[in-house]
Amino acid sequence: MTTREHRRPVAGREAAVRQDRWLIVGVIGAILACVACFTPVAVIGLGALGLGAFTGHLDAALVALLVGCLALVGYRVWARVGHRG
């Protein structure tokens, strides 16, 4: 028996949320990366923490975070559609 067979079934909305938690994480991460790219919040935050020297590399890190989160969202949507058909 696999571990999936030992779990008790979860009904309704809770099952849907549990199944798509990576989709939710990807969407939230993409939104946060977009907000950080379009506002100086990240620069102000790093400056307040004494890490102002890292603001020059902030664009590369945020673009990589955005691409990674969007890839995660795309994968989860693709997997969700693939299991239905």
Image: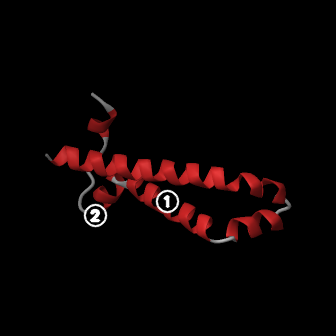
Instruction: Using the image, determine if residue 35 lies above or below residue 6.
Output: below
Q: Residues within 10 Å of mark 1 (few under 14, many from 20)?
A: many
- Element under disc 2: helix
Q: Does dot 1 land on a helix, a strand or a loop?
A: helix
Q: Earlier in the sequence, mark 2 or mark 1?
A: 2
- Residue at image coords 36%, 50%: 74
Looking at the rendered structure, which numbered label has been put on residue 60?
Answer: none
Which residue shows up at 22% across the image and 49% down it? 81
- Residue pictured at 38% horizontal, 55% vertical: 23
Horizontal and vertical percent position of residue 28: 48, 62
Residue 47 location (% of width, % of height): 81, 65
Q: Which mark is residue 13?
A: 2
Q: Is residue 29 left or right of residue 72?
A: right
In the rendered image, which residue does mark 1 sit on?
A: 30
Q: Looking at the image, is mark 2 or mark 1 nearer the viewer? A: 1
Identified by mark 1, the residue type is: Ala
Report if residue 3 is visible in the image: yes
Q: Where's residue 49, x and y in %?
A: 82, 63
Residue 2: which quarter of the image? top left
Rendered residue at 51%/58% (across/down): 29
Residue 8 appears in view:
no
Quadrant in which the N terminus is drawn: top left
| Whole-number angstrom distance, CA of label 2 to CA of label 1 | 24 Å
* Residue 40 against residue 60 in the figure, above or below: below
Residue type at mark 2: give it: Arg
Q: Residue furthest left?
A: 85
Q: Is residue 50 left or right of residue 57?
A: right
| Horizontal side of residue 39 vs 7, given as left or right | right
Rendered image coloring scheme: secondary structure
Which one is nearer the viewer's eye here, 18 or 30? 30
Compared across the picture, whether 43 is left or right of 48 comes to: left
Q: Quadrant of residue 38?
A: bottom right
